[in-house]
Amino acid sequence: MTTPPSPPGTERADESAVRIGALAPLTRPGWVGAGQHLLAGLELAVSDVNAAGGIAGRPLALVVRDTAADPERAAAAVDELALLGVAAVVGEYHSVVARAAAARADALGVPFLCSSAVLDALTEQPTRWVARLAPAQSHGWRIYADFLLGAGHSRIAVAVDPSVYWASGTRILRDHLARRGGSVIELDTRALTPTALCDELVDSGATALLLLVGHPDPAVSIVKSVRHDPRLAEILIGAPAGQPEFAEWAASLGDDGAAIPFLRYLPERLGPLGVRVESALRERLAQAPSFVAFEGYDTVVVLADVLRSHGTDRARVAGSWPGVAVEGTRGRIQFSRTPGISVRQWAWAPVQVVDRDPAEPGRFRILHTG
């Protein structure tokens, strides 16, 4: 695994280095596995950039801050990183946390290239300072809804935690399914134990249950309860936010965690750069890299190209987003103004619906592409 970042104030970066602030959830209650994969991708790309001569002969250096899935902590980190003179801020996995970071970056005039968060409304108003690599939630989750309909599921139950992100996902699913004759039933995990949730699920007549909840709790206990309830033997469990992508999922659930479709943002086949990066990430992480690690790598690829072409002035970096055209690990990356999205957006990274193969839970099956 990657080495934890140094505590604030202990960086010893070369004074000539071009410094980039990096945000990632590296401690609980953040999704630590996602944060480690994101950081591994960022670090590998920085290493590759420096091996190729850096930025006009200057080394690139990451200044890492742990958000721990805390929006206030992320906003404070952006303040600190701005004072440290970073050319830009990158990263973050949790959408609500990234939204806080984006708002602060916008207010301070600091470029923020968001790696992995998907919430459509990353900022309340359109901004020139923020760009994003991950597909917007409305794009990916509509593809997921199309997968459900194609698999014969039109009455969908969702187990929901209170969150802006989960509420947004529920709304996207409900609107998309309703236009196609489907429906969504909400099950509030604050009010229902896993056993009571199973009872409600049986009564609902739903053929699929989507986990719009955190991991490990309550996701693990819900999956175990549903899997071991004979009344629900035919129910499909899904996790559009991607929880089953990470090794912690398989470690927590074993065979119970297989056959649970989720979204990931990878092409069916990686090109030469992607293959090389996949191998290096696998060695760095000592496990198969998730799509989040590729998002981290691509973030630095984009930013390094911008810094080489436009220098380190923050306004020039932010002004360069419309002209980006870079080959990343998952395709050619360009940013545009996309209707309904307040930031410059790569439209779109490749989207797959995959699951862990019940016969071999370490292997992923591609079920649908969009």
Image (tube, rainbow, N blue to C red):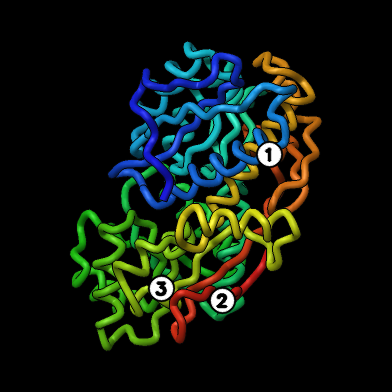
Residue 296 in the image, given as x and y percentages of width and height: 57, 44
Q: Are marks 2 and 3 in contact (CB under 8 Å)?
A: no
* Residue drawn at point x = 77 percent, y = 20 percent: 310
Distance from label 2 to label 3 (Cα)? 15 Å
* Residue drawn at point x = 55 percent, y = 80 percent: 152
Front residue of 149/284: it is 284
* Residue drawn at point x = 63 percent, y = 72 percent: 368
Does residue 132 appear left or right of residue 251 in this picture?
right
Residue 123 in the image, given as x and y percentages of width and height: 54, 29
Does residue 244 appear left or right of residue 292 in this picture?
left
Q: Of the residues shown, which amino acid type is indicated by label 1?
A: Val
Which residue is under mark 2? 365
Q: Callout 1 environment at 10 Å: few (<14), some (14 to 19), or many (20+)?
A: many
Residue 244: image quadrant is bottom left
Residue 202 in the image, given as x and y percentages of width and height: 30, 79
Q: Of the residues shown, which amino acid type is indicated by label 3?
A: Ile
Rendered position, 264 above or below 62:
below
Please tell me whether mark 2 sits on a helix, a strand or a loop: strand
Does residue 305 appear left or right of residue 34 in this picture?
right
Distance from label 2 to label 1 (Cα)? 28 Å
Which residue is under mark 3? 237
Rendered position, 94 above or below 20:
below
Residue 52 in the image, given as x and y percentages of width and height: 72, 36
Residue 17: image quadrant is top right
Closer to the camera: disc 2 or disc 3? 2
Q: Are marks 2 and 1 in contact (CB under 8 Å)?
A: no
Residue 227: image quadrant is bottom left
Does residue 205 appear left or right of residue 145 in this picture?
left
Res 301 label: 1
Closer to the camera: disc 2 or disc 1? 1
Please tell me whether mark 1 sits on a helix, a strand or a loop: helix
